């Protein structure tokens, strides 16, 4: 069983990470590079905008901090990071399949959408993707809220899908709303060096690329898991018949 999970997660993570890197290279990365031109430009040439009343929050940049250069270094760094994340998520999906195996490969898309809702959509409602040069709240507070939002969404979805008693479904709705009622930590002043139009494009690009990534990962993992389980394929054929 462990070998089956590891093989499914390894191949799924590799394929999904490569897909995500391609999507990011053509859509997300150009927006980040464009935002970095505002972040690195002299202060006299940049007109930062605010999203609320108050003084402009300072943007501090560490001149000594290492960052990958444009080109192969950036692509390689992005691919490596995507691979680690994708394999981790794929391990989680494969482990869940051992508890409730997908009856058809197409069901993997539903698992992928659930992962997208838990790890992307729900946290994004409070902490949307940010371009370089955007003011942000304390990192630890944001991480804690992100984990809380993802965990509550996962528990709520599990109860909504698998629980039968209506009271549990009501509880699921309450659990789902708790982190959003509390609210994500926010900076004192919402400010950004990049134009608002660029911010909007980046948020849309991030959401759509992650949606494609999760659906693809769900489909690939379900297909590989069923392929390594002849019993599931036999059951699917008999069910279709």
Image (tube, rainbow, N blue to C red):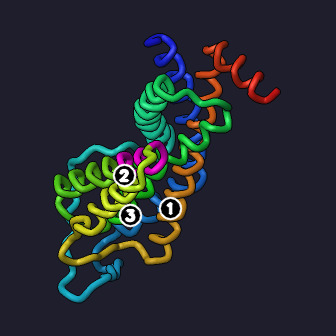
Residue 139 position within the rendered picture, expressed as x and y whole percent measured from the top left:
20, 55
Image point 46% across, 52% down: which residue? 117
SS assignment for the magenta stretch, majority = helix
- Rounded to the nearest angstrom, the CA distance separating label 2 from label 1 is 43 Å
The residues bearing labels 1 and 3 have C-alpha atoms spaced at a distance of 15 Å
* Residue 210, visible in the rendered structure: yes
How many numbered tags mark residues here? 3
Q: Nearer the viewer, residue 16 or 78?
A: 16
As drawn, 130 above or below 82: below
Tell me where residue 128 sits by quadrant.
bottom left
Looking at the image, residue 221 sits to the left or right of residue 196; the answer is: right
Q: Which residues are magenta?
A: 154-162
- Magenta-drawn stretch contains 146: no
> Which disc number belongs to residue 168?
2
On the image, numbered disc 1 is attached to which residue? 31
Nearer to us: label 1 or label 3: 3
Q: Residues within 10 Å of mark 3 (few under 14, many from 20)?
A: some
Splitting the image into 4 quarters, where does residue 41 fall?
bottom left
Residue in the image at 30% along x and 82% along y: 50
Say which residue label 3 marks. 128
Residue 33: give x, y in percent of width and height: 46, 58
Crowdedness near tag 1: few (<14), some (14–19) or many (≥20) residues, C-alpha within 10 Å? many
Please give left or right for residue 64 compared with residue 207 in the image.
Answer: left
Q: Position of residue 60 (x, y in %)?
A: 20, 64
**Callout 3 secondary element:** loop
Please provide percent x and percent y for residue 20: 55, 42
The mark that comes first in sequence, 3 or 2, is: 3
Instruction: Write the residue at 39% across / 65% down.
Output: 125
Task: Classify residue 100 as left or right of residue 170.
Answer: right
């Amino acid at each position: 069983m462990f070998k089956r999970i590891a093989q499914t997660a390894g191949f799924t993570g590799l394929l999904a990470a490569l897909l995500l890197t391609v999507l990011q290279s053509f859509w997300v990365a150009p927006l980040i590079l464009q935002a970095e031109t505002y972040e690195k430009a002299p202060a006299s040439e940049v007109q930062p905008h605010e999203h609320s009343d108050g003084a402009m929050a300072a943007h501090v940049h560490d001149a000594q901090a290492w960052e990958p250069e444009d080109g192969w270094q950036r692509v390689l760094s992005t691919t490596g990071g995507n691979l680690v994340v994708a394999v981790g998520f794929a391990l989680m999906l494969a482990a869940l399949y051992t508890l409730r195996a997908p009856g058809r490969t197409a069901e993997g898309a539903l698992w992928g959408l659930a992962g997208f809702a838990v790890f992307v959509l729900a946290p994004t409602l409070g902490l949307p993707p940010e371009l370089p040069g955007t003011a942000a709240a304390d990192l630890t507070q944001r991480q804690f809220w992100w984990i809380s939002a993802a965990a509550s969404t996962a528990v709520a979805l599990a109860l909504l899908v698998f629980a039968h008693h209506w009271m549990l479904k009501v509880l699921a709705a309450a659990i789902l709303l708790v982190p959003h009622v509390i609210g994500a930590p926010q900076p004192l002043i919402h400010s950004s060096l990049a134009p608002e139009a660029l911010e909007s494009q980046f948020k849309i690009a991030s959401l759509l690329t992650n949606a494609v990534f999760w659906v693809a990962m769900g489909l690939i993992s379900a297909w590989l898991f069923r392929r390594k389980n002849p019993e599931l394929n036999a059951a699917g054929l008999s069910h279709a018949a």
